[in-house]
Image (cartoon, coloured by chain):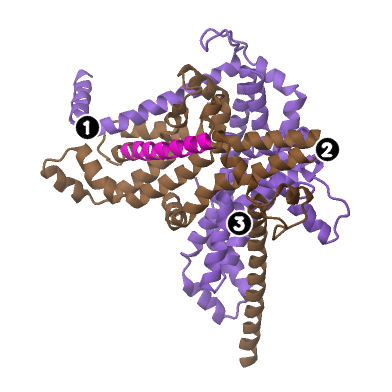
Chain colours: A brown, B purple
Amino acid sequence: MNGKVAKEDLDSRVFDTLNIILLAICTIIIVVPLWNVIISSFSSGRALAEGGFIFWSPEFSLENYRAVFNDPSIWQAFFISVSKTTIGVVTHVFFCAMVGYGLSKKYIRGRKLYVAMGVITMFFSGGMIPTYLLIKSLGLLNSFWVYIIPALFSFYDVVILMNFFRNVPDSLEESAKIDGAGDWHIFLKIFIPLSMPAMATIALFNGVGQWNDFMTTKLYITDQSLYPLQMMLYEIIVQSQTQSMQNIGGSAVIETTTKGVQLATIVITTLPIVLIYPILQRYFISGMMLGAVKE
Amino acid sequence: MGQRVREFIIDYRRQWEIQSMIIPGIIFMIIFCYIPIYGLTIAFKNYTVIDTLATAPWVGLENFRIILSDKYFWDAVVNTLGISFLKLGIGFVIPIILAIMIYELNSGRFKKFVQTVSYLPHFLSWIVLGGMLITWFSTTGLFNQMLLSLGLISQPQNILLDAGKYWWIATLSDIWKEAGWGTILYLAIMSKIDPTYYEAAKIDGASRLRQIWNITLPNMRSIISLNLILTVSGLLGSNLDQTLVLMNSQNREKAEVINSYVYRMGMSQGDFSYATAVGLGVSIVSVILLVTANKITSKLNDNQSVL
């Protein structure tokens, strides 16, 4: 009997050790490449041209960042990224919460039709070209508002918020109504403060989406002064790729400067996300659960 | 009838305040979702810049006929399917295994660390990751240096210029980015499994692997099926951002997917009707895939439909 338990114990310990080793390898596979990008971005052009380092750069320098920060169009792009993300998130969350609150009331006239209309949009869409033609005919091409208006609404987010509002006890609404409060008042003064966790989750997901989005720019914007960081980075990447293909075997000097600029831009573009990541992490797990437990 | 209409109007009047919250959403959906769905009709028209949607002449199924004989379209289909099936075959299983491994960890701090690290790549945009991949795979970059120092290759080579390896690059980079994120849902489900199952199994002398096989996996069956259905229905819509940033003149023939083809035909070449027809065809096939996958998994799950 004792021998059996000991054997199981041993099995279990082998399992644990193997498990820890494998997971350690997984984290290394993620961390090392990211670390390499960061130290590369702080490397001098010569070190980048020679390459050959993994964990530590042979020659540190801030020249890449100096080059990036001296470029006024990067600042412009940063400003566009920040403003489209903040304005986009606030309007999106408010709009979805407003619709979700309305739909969370079972006694609403036409509720079935509204929900059916919403569900259809989850499975069917016009796709790229009809949407482009619509945006064009609305006069949103090359306008800052193309980042905000088409992104106002998402039926997924409406459903999540609707379910959240539905879990708030009815008595709260009733007592407020007795005190003479209207629906808007109840929504703004009672329900919005109560549903901060749900709204924060949606805000954070939507914010990451807005910050990372580049297709909107690629499809609808040709005016460079409206480029966000992602599009700037994309242009630098495409440019350096064609250059490096033209220069195969040729001069490496131009290529390395663009490479340095590219790396510094990557780090700058990602930095805001990494900075809010700790806050993000606290919320998104509960957010995933919110989305999963719909029934 | 008049009676009912009047009741309806009275109801709306009474509810005007709350209806005023919903109506903007409905107007939004009509403009930004339903008008583009109506816009799909240009797939059956010959739309040129001089026309409007209404005046463009109908051509019936002509655009679809051209698609069937378009070599570049079929190349894109083959690439889309190839990459999607690699992503499905490998990328679907890895998050499940990873989640089980994380779940089995005893040390709380290491567990938290692994989770934090593995979620992180999900938050990088494809543009950022594309830029990183180009750096890693360059002849002086991380990837070649690693292989050189391990003695696996003798000459550095940029595999992003090697069309034959593109499918693998697309698949593995996607897994690197999303596998950790994919574990969240599974971990959430596993945290709800009743621990007494495991205790009973331990008393019966079941090994750890046995416990995973007989307790953990069966408890995740329905969520795995649901995920599979959603993945299968998205098979043809493989990542446009990824393709646009990783595709170059050297690997184009293996990198072009249906979405990037629609983008190229529509936005670069201005062939709106043709591009819309391709897009419409793909969504129809996707809906068929969704329904089929749902049927099959519901058969496997004792006739309980997951959707």
Asked whether the beta carbons under mark 2 and mark 1 sit within 8 Å of each other, the answer is no
Residue at the far left in the pictured view: A179
In this orientation, which residue lies closer to the viewer: A270 or B195? A270
Residue B238 in view of the camera: no
Residue carrying label 2:
A248
Task: Name, please, the residue furthest toward the bottom.
Answer: A2
Residue located 53% across and 26% down the image: A126
Above or below — where is A61 with respect to B73? below
Q: Label 2 amino acid? A: Ile
In the rendered image, which residue does mark 3 sit on? B95
**Main secondary-structure element of the magenta-colored stretch:** helix
Type of residue at label 3?
Answer: Pro
> Looking at the picture, does residue B200 appear above or below residue A197?
below
Q: Nearer the viewer, residue A120 or A21?
A: A21
Q: Is residue B38 magenta?
A: no
Helix, strand or loop at label 2? It is loop
Magenta span has A95?
yes
Q: CA distance from mark 3 to mark 1?
A: 46 Å
The quadrant where residue A217 appears: top right
Q: Chain of mark 2?
A: A
Q: Residues within 10 Å of mark 1 (few under 14, many from 20)?
A: some
Q: Which residue is mark 1?
A: B17
Q: Distance between the Cα atoms at labels 2 and 3?
A: 39 Å
Q: Residue at coordinates 67% horizontally, 48% vertically from top-left?
A: B173
Using the rendered image of the protein, determine whether residue A52 is visible from the camera's viewpoint: yes
Residue sitting at 82 percent across and 60 percent down? B149
- In space, the residues marked 2 and 1 are separated at their CA atoms by 67 Å
Q: In the rendering, at what x and y percent does residue B104 appear?
A: 57, 70
Q: Nearer the viewer, residue B282 or A101?
A: A101
Q: Position of residue B35 (x, y in %)?
A: 46, 21
Q: Which amino acid, mark 1?
A: Glu
| Co-location on one chain, circles 2 and 3 | no
